Image (cartoon, helix red, strand yellow):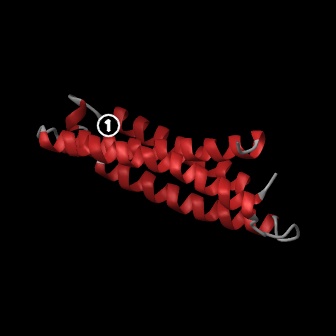
């Protein structure tokens, strides 16, 4: 398995686990309406934890692959671009959705959660696109 494919797997899993932890913490902290649940701390901790976990996993995979070399060829670059394009589309969708919610004067809770969900979808679906390209090949 290529170094970049391992990183894609790790980032997809980290994003899913981080978001699942966030949702569980927010749902458990909601005593009344969901909008009034304390979410900011959980949001910041899970995003920060995801960033740290991504860095640590990249370092770990880099150390594990040091004997194989970390050369990135044209195929890796093309697959990386392909996955990034898939992922970035969800960032745009999330940004537009957040603007629509802001224009509708929705609660900050919903705006923040739409943005966080778009970041998670971007990471997961971009990583899955990269994994699929490594497994099935590029068309």
Residue at 29% x, 50% y is 40
Badge 1 element: helix
Outermost residue, top direction? 32
x%, y% of residue 62? 74, 67
x%, y% of residue 65? 82, 65
> Along the horizontal axis of the image, is 94 left or right of 51?
left
x%, y% of residue 82? 60, 50
> Along the horizontal axis of the image, is 131 left or right of 101?
right
User: Toward which corner of the image does residue 139 lie, by quadrant?
Assistant: top right
Disc 1 target residue? 29
Q: Confirm whether residue 38 shows in the render.
A: no
Residue 135 vs 61, above or below: the answer is above
Residue 37 vs 8, above or below: the answer is above
Q: Confirm whether residue 113 shows in the render.
A: yes
Q: Nearer the viewer, residue 126 or 68?
A: 126
Residue 46 vs 77, above or below: the answer is above
Outermost residue, right direction? 67
Residue at 35% x, 32% y is 27
User: Toward which corner of the image does residue 96 lie, by quadrant?
Assistant: top left
Residue at 16% x, 40% y is 107
In this figure, what is the number of numbered marks?
A: 1
Residue at 28% x, 40% y is 97
Outermost residue, front direction? 139
> Along the horizontal axis of the image, is 127 left or right of 93?
right
User: Toward which corner of the image does residue 48 lie, by quadrant?
Assistant: bottom left
x%, y% of residue 30? 28, 33
> Along the horizontal axis of the image, is 56 left or right of 34?
right
- Crowding near the residue tagged with mark 1, few <14, some 14–19, many ≥20 C-alpha atoms within 10 Å: some
């Amino acid at each position: 398995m290529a170094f970049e494919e391992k990183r894609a797997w790790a980032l997809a899993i980290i994003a899913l686990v981080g978001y699942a932890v966030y949702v569980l913490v927010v749902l458990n902290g909601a005593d009344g309406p969901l909008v009034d649940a304390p979410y900011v701390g959980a949001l910041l901790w899970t995003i920060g934890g995801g960033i740290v976990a991504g860095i640590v996993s990249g370092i770990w995979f880099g150390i594990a692959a040091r004997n194989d070399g970390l050369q990135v060829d044209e195929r890796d670059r093309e697959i990386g671009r392909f996955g990034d394009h898939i992922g970035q589309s969800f960032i745009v969708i999330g940004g537009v959705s957040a603007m629509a919610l802001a224009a509708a004067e929705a609660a900050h809770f919903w705006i923040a959660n739409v943005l966080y969900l778009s970041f998670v979808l971007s990471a997961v679906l971009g990583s899955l696109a990269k994994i699929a390209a490594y497994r099935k090949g590029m068309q």
